[in-house]
Image (cartoon, grey):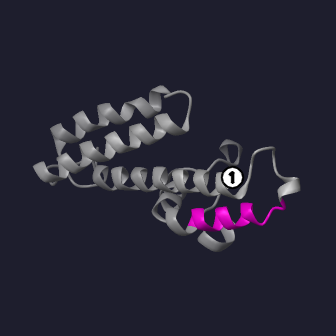
Amino acid sequence: MLEEAYKVIRSAYHGGDFEGNHCRKFMRKADPVMDSVQALLLDIPEQNRAPGCNDEEIQRCCGAFKRLFQYFDGLIHCCQQSFGTLTDGDMLDVRKLVAMLDRLWRRMFNAVPPKAHAMWHLVKDLERFRGLKHH
């Protein structure tokens, strides 16, 4: 479905993972993609689902992942700005965005791996360089 409807394609190497530009495309289209995923999951008859996986749980989880991907998309957008272009107001928005992303991550998952924690270090780099486009 991701490949046909949204042109998000798995890599031919690295075990077929989604990488780089296709992850970015997925996050940029988080709203319609996650709506499609939710519809696909809701179409599965309840007797064929895991225990406790009712319509409300599917909607809750898909909504949370949609927000998570949207937050990452916003953060990536800020990172892809040229050096020196992010204003003090932009940096205030970046700090708010990372705080929301961190809170949502901690509510969704039991652990925060080092890669996810690195978002806070990214804020320091963005504060210093005011964009990371060619870094």
- To which quarter of the image does residue 42 belong? bottom right
> Residue 28, position in %: x, y?
45, 63
Q: Position of residue 4 (x, y in %)?
A: 68, 72
Specify whether residue 90 is in view.
Answer: yes
Q: Position of residue 54 (x, y in %)?
A: 73, 53
Main SS category, magenta section: helix
Q: Is residue 30 above or below residue 80?
A: below
Position of 131 with respect to 12 (left or right) is left
Instruction: Write down the residue under mark 1.
Output: 12
Circle 1: residue type = Ala
Task: Compare residues 38 and 84 and report the one nearer the observer.
Answer: 38
Quadrant showing the N terminus: bottom right
In-image side of 109 versus 75 (left or right): right
Q: Residue furthest right?
A: 47
Residue depicted at 52% across the width and 51% down the height: 64
- Segment tinted magenta in the rendering: 33-45
The residue most toward the left is 88
Residue 17, horizontal then vertical, whole percent: 65, 47
